[in-house]
Image (cartoon, grey):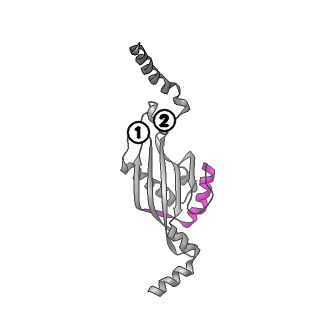
Amino acid sequence: MKKLLAIVGLAATAYLPAAYADQFPHVHAETHNNVQCIKTNEDEIKALFDRWNAALATLDPEEVAEEYASDAILLPTLSDIPRTNHDEIKEYFVHFLQKKPQGKINMRVIKIGCNTASDTGLYTFTVHEKNGKTKQVEARYSFVYEYDDDQWLIEHHHSSLMPEQLALAAHPHHHHAKAHHHG
């Protein structure tokens, strides 16, 4: 009898998780559905930023928007409006590209999963102001990439000014006066 209960118990533990799996999806469900995980490495993921930065250099909003998945979300540096589709992402870059931005990574951490990767860190943008002067803008960033349709695309991109830059923008005279006091 104990042996029979043990067998029934084992069968139930094997069956129940499979029977209810769709009600409790795993965060990384794709790794459990026989999906082929594309092999990649840090250098390939680093190159995705370079590809995006090269798209910025074209000054073509469509070219930049093509770097994003169709269902991507962009939480941009210079706007408080989330962009959640191709047209909205393109529209943001129409204005941002007027500054002729070029980014440089200062520090990053790359994580790689099954057909996903993230590149998170700090970058500095050189932007051109309307008066012809260039300005350095430091920001925090996160890119989440997804491998889909035989290519890596940006699924999520968040960029925000460094807190020090926000404080400077809010009180430019306070910082300027302080610098002269100590200088």
**Residue in the image at 53% along x and 50% along y:** 156
Tell me whether the residue at label 1 lies in contact with that at label 2, contact meaning CB atoms closer than 8 angstroms.
Answer: no
Counting from the top left corner in percent of width and height, residue 176 is at: 52, 82
**Residue in the image at 45% along x and 24% along y:** 13
Picture layout, residue 169 above or below residue 154: below
Magenta range is 76-105
**Residue in the image at 52% along x and 35% along y:** 25
Give the secondary structure at mark 2. helix
Counting from the top left corner in percent of width and height, residue 121 is at: 44, 58
The amino acid at mark 1 is Ile
The amino acid at mark 2 is Ala
Specify few, some or many for label 1: CA neighbours under 10 Å numbering under 14, 14-19, or 20 or more.
few
Horizontal placement of 9 versus 95: left or right? left
Q: In front of the other: label 1 or label 2? A: 2
The C terminus, quarter of image: bottom left
Work out how far the residue at label 1 is from the one at label 2, CA to CA, in angstroms: 15 Å
- Residue nearest the viewer, comparing 9 with 161: 9
- Residue nearest the viewer, comparing 36 with 62: 36
Counting from the top left corner in percent of width and height, residue 32 is at: 45, 32
Q: Which quarter of the figure has residue 60?
A: bottom right
Q: Residue furthest front?
A: 1
Specify few, some or many for label 2: CA neighbours under 10 Å numbering under 14, 14-19, or 20 or more.
some
What number is the disc on residue 38? Answer: 1
- Residue nearest the viewer, comparing 37 with 9: 9
Give the secondary structure at mark 1. loop
Q: Which residue is mark 2?
A: 29
Counting from the top left corner in percent of width and height, residue 154 is at: 50, 49
